[in-house]
């Protein structure tokens, strides 16, 4: 069994403790991968590109709502919400958004 983590110093001792307690097999291999968080950082880059034209936010509430909307649309594009869609293709995404946010098109 292999466990891949980034280079945070807390993972090593935590995994060693789990092995001592018998919650992880002794043969478990801990691999520290320097660039493991690049996938997360790549998503942040896209988010920054979307936020820049907005020129900041006046309140925390509007910031939260706007960023949440960006994240939802990004998840839809990546296909992460496919099981929640009401039909296939773009119309399935439209119906999902309509029902979740009570916004209906005419």
Image (cartoon, rainbow, N blue to C red):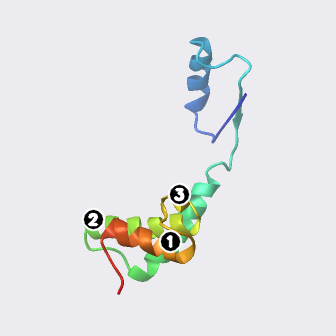
Query: From the viewer's perspective, is 101 left or right of 75?
Result: left
Q: Residue at x 35, y 68 (%)?
A: 99
Determine the residue located farthest toward the top in the rendered image. Answer: 21
Query: From the viewer's perspective, is 52 left or right of 82?
Result: left
The relative height of residue 93 versus residue 31 in the rendered view (above or below) is: below
Instruction: Give the Cα distance between marks 2 and 3.
Output: 31 Å
Closer to the N terminus: mark 3 or mark 1? 3
Report the quarter where the N terminus lies: top right
| Residue 13 in which image quadrant | top right
What residue is shown with label 2? 60
Nearest to the eye among marks 2 and 3: give it. Answer: 3
Pointer 3 local density, CA inside 10 Å: few below 14, some 14–19, many at least 20 = few
| Residue 58 in which image quadrant | bottom left
What residue is shown with label 1? 92
Q: Residue at x 36, y 83 (%)?
A: 105
**Mark seen at residue 83:** 3
Closer to the N terminus: mark 2 or mark 3? 2
Residue 84, image x and y in percent? 48, 59
Q: Residue at x 40, y 70 (%)?
A: 97
Q: Residue at x 60, y 12 (%)?
A: 20
Figure label count: 3
């Amino acid at each position: 069994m292999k466990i891949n983590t980034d280079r945070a110093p807390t993972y090593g001792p935590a995994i060693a403790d789990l092995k001592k307690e018998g919650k992880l097999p002794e043969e478990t291999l801990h691999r520290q991968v320097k660039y493991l968080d690049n996938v997360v950082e790549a998503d942040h880059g896209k988010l920054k590109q979307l936020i820049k034209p907005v020129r900041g936010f006046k309140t925390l509430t509007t910031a939260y709502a706007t960023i949440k909307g960006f994240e939802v649309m990004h998840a839809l594009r990546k296909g992460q919400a496919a099981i929640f869609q009401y039909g296939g293709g773009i119309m399935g995404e439209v119906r999902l958004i309509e029902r979740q946010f009570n916004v209906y098109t005419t």
